[in-house]
Amino acid sequence: MLKSENSTIKTIKSLYDERAKYGPYSTLAPFSKGNDKSKYISHVFDYAIFSRLAVVQKMTRVLDYGCGTGILTNQLPDYFPEVVGVDISEKMLAIAENLKLNHENVKFELIDGLTMPFKNNYFSVVIARESLCHVPDKALPRVASEICRVIEEGGIFLLLEQVTESKSWRNPPEASYTIKRSVDELIAVIEKQGLSLCSVKTVRKPRFPWIYLIQMGIVPRYIYKKLAKLEVLFVQTIFPVKTCRWHDVLFTFQKI
């Protein structure tokens, strides 16, 4: 492991260990500290991912790479007989374990982010939700190769990432530990490891109109899921995947 990679891992681990004090939704919209905005964004991502899973034919084992507090992982037993979440933050995984309840087919493992203790071709689906943005450029091919290694032939990789076509948004000062890459850059890295792109769709735009009402507590929580679905469907229909300002995009790759 390169010193720079080890330093980045320690930085991200420390960041997420600290962020864990804000609870299960602390990984989304991090400056919101797990508030209603974070919870709403979670519903947006959930709808985008689960609507894609609905068309996946073979689902046996699933890996949630960079699972954080497990808010996605602990919903996956409804779709898969075996669910695994991995992360580099012990404190995040402690929250994930507490959320597990009676799901005996869910387990969590602490990893360094660069290697995983799983056999080749072990998972039918791997999901990475805003986790590769924390991987340095030099380490990204290695991480992508490891993800590809554990996916079975015909298996699916769902990658939800913040992307941008503008260098000015790539390393924002307020979040210098993240890298917002271009759409083509991510596709090239993943396809080089043996996966083939099936689809790529925009799922969320920053400052979507009703997010301000949610932040102010005006919107009741029981309609968050309906609003999230409407936002995803609207954004996928209207907005292109390549824009200068950053936004969230869902890539679907398959191992051929």
Image: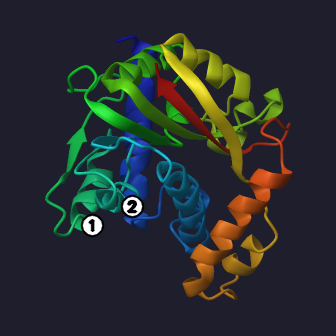
Front residue of this view, candidates 182 and 225:
225
Residue at x 57%, y 84% (from the top left corner): 221
**Does 195 appear above or below 155?**
above
Mark 1 Cα-neighbour bin, 10 Å: few <14, some 14–19, many ≥20: some
Where does the image place residue 175, in percent across and percent down from the top left? 63, 42
Left or right of residue 145: residue 107: left
Q: Residue at x 34, y 54 (%)?
A: 73
Q: How far is the residue under mark 1 from the one under mark 2?
A: 8 Å
Helix or strand or loop: what does disc 1 sit on? helix
Q: Which mark is drawn over residue 99?
A: 1
Mark 2, other Cα within 10 Å: few <14 / some 14–19 / many ≥20? some
Question: In this figure, what is the number of numbered marks?
Answer: 2
Q: Is residue 37 visible?
A: yes
Q: Quadrant of residue 88?
A: top left
The image quadrant where one finds the N terminus is top left
Amino acid carrying mark 1 in the image: Leu
Query: According to the image, label 2 marks what residue?
Result: 71
In the figure, is residue 118 to the left or right of 206?
left
Q: Residue furthest front?
A: 57
Q: Position of residue 33 (x, y in %)?
A: 53, 65
Front residue of this view, candidates 134 and 83:
83
**Which amino acid type is shown beneath numbered disc 2?**
Ile
